[in-house]
């Protein structure tokens, strides 16, 4: 199943290049009073909503994907957990380029020593929204990543059970201002996490460890890799993350980017692709 959020926060089922409005399925979500439960309500209830979504889609008229504005497919993540330098060749390019590591030892170590970092949830947008360059005097780079959406509460998860906690997958863009500061600061600016174009449920991607991913800017291929080259695989990252954090439905795990990170500037157009998920087009503009 492929689900999107579009236009004015409508829920859509994506099939054969079209979107069918299935927002009526959300009427089955439980109502809550403050304090609200942790996690994204739709992602938490997704297993129970699938039949309602299919029934609603059967009654809806299709609209071409190109005719709608795609928002982030996850509306309310509690956490965005990101994996730095999780491809060996990307680690090598960071070590070799002072513009990427800024003499920080933390930026030049493998993920086992560097650890994970958190991005502000307020940095998240969908592909139809623009990445807005906040500090034009500094280098700002694209990083394309497989994004994992957690489907249920996860704590101290074992490697062999990790994929059972995944709701689905998206394309993620981790936009990064370069500099000596901590990653969480430089990567949490408004619009600097792009998630989309939709959520592909985990049953559609049984093996996230062998997916091609790439990004082109203005038609120039910048990054191309495969998730088989992750230093810590998707199950390994879930095991690692849940040894520190409790993850809740809708939490997002950005798995790292391959080599080829490069600057973007206002006017650029990014085309990101991941095998099994699809492609998304994201525009860059000035503040």
Image: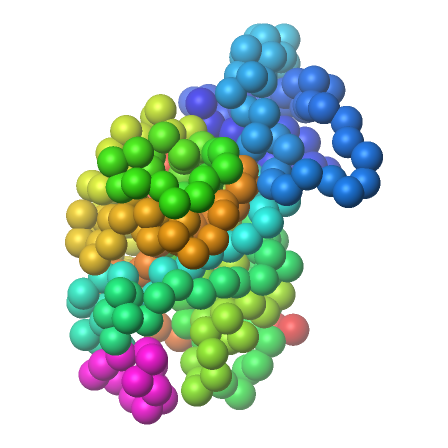
Could you tell me if residue 282 is visible in this image? no
Specify the quadrant of the image occupied by residue 110.
Answer: bottom left
- Please tell me whether the stretch drawn in magenta is mainly helix, strand or loop: helix
180 relative to 105 in the view: left or right: right
Q: Nearer the viewer, residue 134 or 112?
A: 112
Q: Nearer the viewer, residue 283 or 229?
A: 229
Residue at 69% x, 23% y is: 29
Count of numbered badges drawn on the protein:
0
Could you tell me if residue 244 is visible in this image? yes
Residue at 41% x, 35% y is: 166
Residue 233 placement (x, y as % from top left): 25, 49
Magenta-drawn stretch contains 103: yes
Residue 169 placement (x, y as % from top left): 41, 39
Residue at 27% x, 79% y is: 108
Residue at 26% x, 84% y is: 97
Residue 109 placement (x, y as % from top left): 25, 75
191 relative to 236 in the view: left or right: right
117 relative to 120 in the view: left or right: left
Q: Please say if 24 is above or below 201.
A: above
Magenta-drawn stretch contains 283: no
Q: Please say if 211 is above or below 219.
A: above
Q: Nearer the viewer, residue 273 or 183?
A: 183
Numbered range of the magenta stretch: 95-108
């Amino acid at each position: 199943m492929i689900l999107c959020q579009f236009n004015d926060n409508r829920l859509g089922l994506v099939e054969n290049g079209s979107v069918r409005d299935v927002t009526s399925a959300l009427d089955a979500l439980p109502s809550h009073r403050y304090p609200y439960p942790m996690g994204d309500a739709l992602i938490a209830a997704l297993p129970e909503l699938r039949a309602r979504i299919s029934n609603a889609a059967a009654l809806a008229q299709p609209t071409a994907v190109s005719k709608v504005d795609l928002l982030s497919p996850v509306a309310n993540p509690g956490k965005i957990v990101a994996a730095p330098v999780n491809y060996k060749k990307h680690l090598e390019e960071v070590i070799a380029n002072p513009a990427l590591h800024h003499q920080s030892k933390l930026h030049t170590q493998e993920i086992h020593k560097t650890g994970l970092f958190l991005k502000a949830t307020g940095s998240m947008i969908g592909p139809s929204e623009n990445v807005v360059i906040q500090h034009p005097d500094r280098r700002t780079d694209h990083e394309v990543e497989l994004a994992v959406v957690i489907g249920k509460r996860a704590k101290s998860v074992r490697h062999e059970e990790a994929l059972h906690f995944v709701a689905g997958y998206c394309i993620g863009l981790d936009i990064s201002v370069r500099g000596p500061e901590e990653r969480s600061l430089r990567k949490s600016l408004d619009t600097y996490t792009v998630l989309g174009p939709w959520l592909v449920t985990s049953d559609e991607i049984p093996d996230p460890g062998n997916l091609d991913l790439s990004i082109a800017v203005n038609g120039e291929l910048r990054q191309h890799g495969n998730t088989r080259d992750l230093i810590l695989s998707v199950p390994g990252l879930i095991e690692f993350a849940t040894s520190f954090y409790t993850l809740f439905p809708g939490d997002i795990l950005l798995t790292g980017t391959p080599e080829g990170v490069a600057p973007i500037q206002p006017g650029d157009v990014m085309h990101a692709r991941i095998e099994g998920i699809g492609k998304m087009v994201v525009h860059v503009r000035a503040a």
